[in-house]
Amino acid sequence: MSISVENIVYIYGEGTPYETVALNGVSLEIADGEFVGLIGHTGSGKSTLVQHLNGLLKPKSGRVFVGGAEIGAKGAKPVEIRKKIGFLFQYPEYQLFEETVYKDIAFGPTNLGLSKEETDERVRESMAVVGLDFDAFAQRSPFDLSGGQKRKAVIAGVIAMRPEVLILDEPTAGLDPRSQRDVLEMLERIKADRRVIVILISHNMGDVARVADRVVVLEKGRVALSGSPAEVFAHEEFLDSIGLGLPPVTELMRRLRLGGVDVEGSPLDVDEAEELLDRYLREAAAR
């Protein structure tokens, strides 16, 4: 399974006074099993881009391929392509509607026509992946869960469909710090245990640096940067110029350097920063 986006253009309100070019020649390749962080300020084209991946939007020009099949091509079957793609918009817990967590997660597999036995297997499996104990949560009302637990339940429902692509739009938005951490740990489990493409849209640079294999930066409807988290977040001045920050730890180290503390490197996580600071202090003490 792979995704290929070839020079797509998308225009909102074309031919009206409100015409806006949302995507302007975007090309992108995503490999099987890759975890991509998609970042950019509001209006850069992130959500517009991912809505092309399951045919919710059709480009004015250019082509989109998912698993080798061109979306929108003559004879293409959008329904079959969409079965391969799990899509969670912001605040997905508003999609919860069943009496119990079990029934909510089972809704998708049941509509696929799966047997009760296979549906049950998928519910149990997906709850384990997201970190919801089956015995503790399966028969609870989804409306009695915490914000983080609701978010996990919705994601479990998507995973139960066994998509080959999982798209998450701001999955930690609105959650308290503990719930944010739980959701990130869940994403790391998905990354480790499942051979699926994951696309994470986020304004939290720390989240992206923590879980993504590759970071893609959109700016004014174009791909401005693409590379590993270390490569992308090394472009400090450019990211500042387009209104994006750095991961908190990276920003801390930058401010230390600006304050005269000559610490080498731009760490992306606390452990790496601790190692660099420890080395700096030891070397300073030995002078």
Image (cartoon, rainbow, N blue to C red):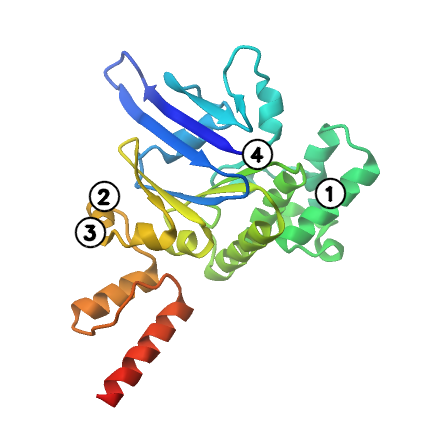
Q: Are marks 4 and 2 in contact (CB under 8 Å)?
A: no
Q: Nearer the viewer, residue 145 or 278?
A: 278
Amino acid type at image mark 2: Ile
Q: Is residue 42 above or below residue 237?
A: above
Dot 4 or dot 2, earlier in sequence: 4
Position of 180 with respect to 241 (left or right) is right
Q: Is residue 131 above or below residue 42?
A: below
State the CA–CA distance, disc 2 to disc 1: 43 Å
Residue at image point 27% right, 19% down: 19
Marks 3 and 1 sit apart, C-alpha to C-alpha, by: 46 Å
In this view, the mark in front (3 or 4): 4
Q: Give the quadrant of residue 15.
A: top left
Distance from the alpha carbon under mark 3 to that under mark 4: 35 Å
Q: CA distance from mark 1 to mark 4?
A: 21 Å
Q: Earlier in the sequence, mark 3 or mark 1?
A: 1
Residue highlighted by disc 4: 1
At x 36%, y 46%, the residue is: 227
Contact flag, marks 3 and 1 (Cβ < 8 Å)? no
What residue is pinned by disc 2? 242
Left or right, residue 227 beside residue 171: left
How many neighbours does mark 1 have within 10 angstroms: few (below 14), some (14-19), or many (20 or more)? many
Identify the mark at residue 122; answer none if there is no mark.
Answer: 1
Q: Residues within 10 Å of mark 2 (few under 14, many from 20)?
A: some
Instruction: Identify the secondary structure beneath mark 2.
Output: loop
**Residue 194: mark:** none
Q: Earlier in the sequence, mark 2 or mark 1?
A: 1
Q: Amino acid at mark 4?
A: Met
Tag 1: residue type? Arg
Question: The residue under label 3 is which amino acid type?
Answer: Glu
